[in-house]
Image: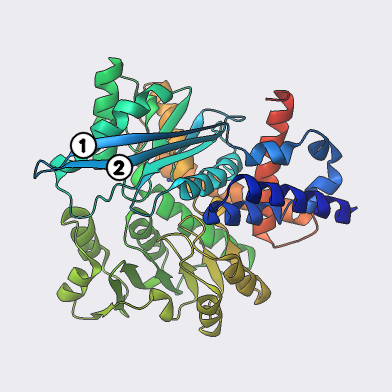
Amino acid sequence: MTTDAGATIEAIYADVLRRNPAEREFHQAVREVLGSLAPVLARHPEYAELKTVERICEPERQIIFRVPWTDDRGEVQIDRGFRVEFNSALGPYKGGLRFHPSVYLGIVKFLGFEQVFKNALTGMPIGGGKGGSDFDPKGRSDAEVMRFCQSFMTELYRHLGEHTDVPAGDIGVGGREIGYLFGQYKRITNRYESGVLTGKGLTWGGARVRTEATGYGAAFFASEMLAARGTSLEGRTVVVSGSGNVALYAVEKVTQRGGRVLACSDSNGYVVDEAGLDLQVLKQVKEVERGRVSDYAARVPTARHVAGGSVWDVPCEVAIPSATQNEIDAARAAALVRGGCVAVSEGANMPCTPEAVAVFQDAGVAFGPGKAANAGGVATSALEMQQNASRDSWSFEHTEARLQQIMHDIHARCAEAAEEYGAPGDLVLGANAAGFIRVAEAMHAHGIV
Ligand code: GLU
């Protein structure tokens, strides 16, 4: 029976390739989910009959728009804006905006597709979407970033709403950008609609722990995987790639839990500090000065900066890749395994290539896929929406306790689904199966839409 399901899946994938040419990352994300669905389809023939998988692979709506703005020298700049509203079976479209020169439709679709299942896994009432622009914020002044955000929102606002589509941040979009975007939305619509964006500032509708949530969540997920194997983060050596929002707060939570974070990175190279990264210095460099990890090395005597190269050359017991997609390939995964790595918790979206995932799984490394391990960010966005809807504001402790429980539940859902579909311990299969089923069931209730 699995063979039939396998053939159906191959045909669906061939169609996705044909209809979405040259969108490499989207193909990879679809392939990864479809690779888990054969046992699910075998047990649920109605999904094949109603073309549920085919419908899930097709975004409900894709918006592409021009974003013109003027830089500080008076030169006109033209960037491209995207919002892919992928699936609204479980709630309003929800997912971040990425501002990075690599952004094109294939990246936004891969992220939107992942987001659908990630959001489903949180158990919260949020659909999936993603957006962004090929705008490069690097080296841009505050005024330029503001003008860009205002132009971006001048088109996007008509597609948004607290019950329709609720963006947040991603790479290149943090509190500053969300502020400019919110200001322009409010101005155009004449509505103080707090729930239209998440990741807001704490004085104007934001939620405590949202900034920390993705990184904390990835560390909590690592703890859950280790606990399932009767161990913990205590005394472990850890490497976290990246040095953005996700990385910083993964470092913080790992350190609080007794782990020692040896290294983190940026696009110029990485910094190693055998004493364990000093979070205060790192936060000062990254959050206050918007500097580089080399500035950290210049200030901390136990640290050294390695220009170029990969942070994954640093051996560790726990890896939390929190930079970007496809940063760990098979060779890097094999090196990590040789270096004694026992757990990988994906803080970024799809940071490990499919070949790398296979290397980890074959070696018996506990592997937490991004759509489970980094779901803490969007889950806390959903908590922000709850607070906005009730005009309430929760304490840090209460919100963090909710986040911790959510990460525990996501791990449990993935582990149970893995068991149920014949692959105990395979959290990739578990995450895909559990996320898919939750979305599919809601779609069935709504008819052929
Ligand atoms: N960009 C984050 C993610 O990849 C957060 C999205 C959100 O909070 O809506 O899940």
| Position of residue 80 measured from the top left corner of the image (x, y, whole percent) | 35, 41
Instruction: Give the structural element (helix, strand or loop) at label 1.
Output: strand
The residue at the far left in this view is 73
Amino acid type shown at disc 2: Asp
Residue 206 as seen in the image, left or right of residue 84: left
Task: Give 292 or 391, whichever is nearer the viewer.
Answer: 292
Instruction: Give the structural element (helix, strand or loop) at label 2.
Output: strand
Residue 150 as seen in the image, left or right of residue 218: left
**Which of the labelled discs sits on residue 69, or is there none?**
1
Q: Residue at x 68, y 36 (%)?
A: 55
Residue assigned mark 2: 79
Q: Residue at x 19, y 56 (%)?
A: 290
The residue at the far bottom in this view is 338
Q: Please determine whether, in this image, residue 91 is positioned above or below residue 422.
A: above
Q: Classify mark 2: residues with Cα within 10 Å, few (<14), some (14-19) or many (20+).
A: some
Task: Give 69 or 394, whichever is nearer the viewer.
Answer: 69
Q: Within the displayed image, which quadrant is ligand 1 positioned in?
A: top left
| Position of residue 44 measured from the top left corner of the image (x, y, whole percent) | 83, 41
Q: Is residue 401 visible?
A: no
Q: Quadrant of residue 146?
A: top left
The residue at the far top in this view is 190
| Position of residue 352 measured from the top left corner of the image (x, y, whole percent) | 53, 65
Mark closest to the chain's N terminus, 1 or 2: 1
| Position of residue 58 measured from the top left corner of the image (x, y, whole percent) | 62, 38
Q: Are marks 1 and 2 in contact (CB under 8 Å)?
A: yes
